[in-house]
Image: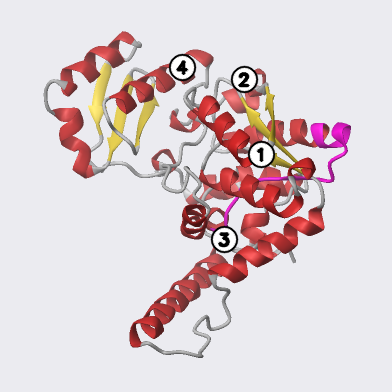
Amino acid sequence: MNTLYRTANEQYYIRRYCRCSSMVEHSFRKAGVEGSNPSIGFMNLQEKYNLLQEELKKLGKVVVAYSGGVDSTFLLKAAVDTLGAENVLACISAGVAEPSNQLKRAAEQARNIGAELQIIETDELDDPKFTSNKADRCFHCKSHICRILMDIAKKKGFDHVVFGTNYDDLDDFRPGNRAIKVFGIRSPLAEAELTKDDIRRLSREMNLPTADLPSSPCLASRIAYGLEVTEQRLKQVDEAEEFLRQLGLVEFRVRHHDTVARIEVNPQDFDKVTKEPNRMKIIEKLKALGFKFVTVDLQGFRSGSLNEPLSDEEKKKSL
C-alpha cells in the first residue's frame, strides 16, 4: 500500500499522534529529562532530514519541479547538497498562471544554491479541462507540468522527477496530488514526513531566504470555481496582488469573483486596506483593472478559501 495516499481518517489520527509526540517532547525538554527518546516512535527533525537524503540518494539524478517557494527551494538545496549540482536540474514554469514577481527571485535563489535552472513554458490555457475551472482544475494543471518534466528528464538522462509536496499536503484538498500519483512522480519531502513547519525550521538552519516566505500558489487558485480561467483574469489577479504587495502587505489574496474582487488579509492588517489613503488607492487600482466591486473579507486570510463552498462529494470526485 502506498502510505503517501492514506484515507482522510488515517491521516487525521496520524497527525493527532504526531502533535501529541511534539507536546511530549516539549515537556521532556522543559523538565530537563536527558537520555530519553521522547519521539514515541516518530522521527525527530534530524532523522527526517537523514531519511530525505537517503531517499534522494536512491533516486540518483533528479529533475526538481521548482517554483522558488518554501518547499521546492528547500528540496532543491537538499538535492544539490546530497547528490551534487551535476545530478540536479531545477525546472520552473514561466506561464501566465504563475505570479510574475516570483521568477526573478527564484532564479537568483537557484543560482545561489548552485543549481542549473531551466525555464519551461506550460500550455494549460489550451486545455478546456483546466480553463473550465471545475474542482479538479489543479489535477489538469499538474498533469501538464508532469508530462513536460518527465519528457525533459527522459531527454536529458535524469532518472526521476521530484515535487516539493510536503507531509501536510497529503491530508489537504489538493487534486494535484492525484496527478503526481498517476505519473509515478516522487515526493521526497512527504516520504520523509517533513511538514511545512519542519521545512521552515530546516530552511532557517540552512539560511535559505525562503524560510519565512508566505505561500503563493498558482494564480488560477484565486479564481472562483465555475468562472473560466483566462489570461486576462490571471493578469487582473497578478496586478492586483502586486499592488497590495507594494502597499506593504505580506500574506494576503485577491479572489476573483467575476466583477467582484474579494480581498483577504490577516485581521491585524484590516486597517492597511480599509483606512485612507490606502482604501481609495486600492479601489481606484482594482477598478482600473476591470473589477466593478472591491470588497474585504471579514473572515480574513485563509489558504484555500475557494474550496469552502465545495461539498464533500465534489471534493471526493476530484481526489
Give the distance between the C-alpha atoms of the residues marked 1 and 2, in whole angstroms: 32 Å
Residue 121 in the image: x percent, y percent? Answer: 67, 21
Give the distance between the C-alpha atoms of the residues marked 3 and 1, in whole angstroms: 23 Å
Secondary element at tag 2: helix
Q: Circle 1 is placed at which residue position? A: 114
Q: Circle 4 is placed at which residue position? A: 235
Residue 176 part of the magenta-drawn span = no
Residue visible at 47% across and 78% down in the picture = 21
Residue visible at 52% across and 22% down in the picture = 229
> Based on the displayed image, in which of its 4 quarters is residue 95 positioned?
top right
Give the mark nearest the N terminus, 3 or 2.
Answer: 2
Badge 1, how many Cα within 10 Å: few under 14, some, many 20+? Answer: some
Q: Are marks 4 and 1 in contact (CB under 8 Å)?
A: no
Give the mark nearest the N terminus, 4 or 1.
Answer: 1
Amino acid bearing label 2: Leu
Q: Circle 3 is placed at which residue position? A: 194
State the extent of the magenta-drawn residues as a range. 152-167
Q: Nearer the viewer, mark 4 or mark 2?
A: 4
Secondary element at tag 4: helix
